[in-house]
Amino acid sequence: MNTKSEFILNEALSMSPAERARIAHCLIYSLEEPKFESVDEQWIQLAQKRLEELENGTVQPVSWEEIKKKVRQ
């Protein structure tokens, strides 16, 4: 990474999670190409699929605390 991108990254990391999420969304959105589905549409499709899996019992929900614990192991 160059100095400018390191500066921007450090600034972003000092922000609240909500601010970082907004910046991430904007950056991802800026990478879209017309020939691909929009990022928002892909997230909607994924969310609908995950909801269906939860509703029909294909998967079991996992709490955020459980996920963090597994990642740290």
Image (cartoon, rainbow, N blue to C red):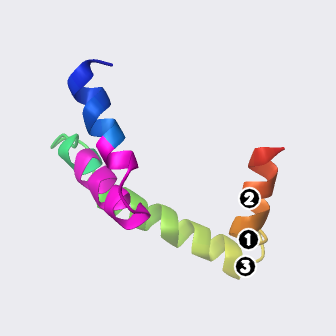
The residue lying toward the viewer, choosing from 35 and 30, is 30
- Under mark 1, the amino acid is Ser
Image coords of residue 72 (percent x, y): 77, 46
Image coords of residue 71 (percent x, y): 75, 47
Image coords of residue 68 (percent x, y): 72, 56
Location of mark 1 (residue): 63
* Earlier-in-chain disc, 2 versus 3: 3
Residues under numbered marks 3 and 1 in contact, where contact means CB atoms less than 8 Å apart: no
Residue 32, image quadrant: top left
Q: Is residue 66 left or right of residue 9?
A: right
Name the disc covering residue 67, or none. 2
Location of mark 3 (residue): 56
Asked which secondary structure carries label 1, the reply is loop
Q: Is residue 5 left or right of residue 13?
A: left
The correct choice, above or below, for 35 with respect to 62 in the image is: above
Asked which secondary structure carries label 2, the reply is helix
The correct choice, above or below, for 63 with respect to 30 in the image is: below
Give the extent of the magenta segment.
11-27
The residue lying toward the viewer, choosing from 61 and 41, is 61
Label 1 Cα neighbours within 10 Å, binned few <14 / some 14-19 / many ≥20 = few
- Under mark 2, the amino acid is Ile
Q: Residue furthest left?
A: 34
Does residue 3 show up magenta in the picture? Answer: no
Residue 38, image quadrant: bottom left
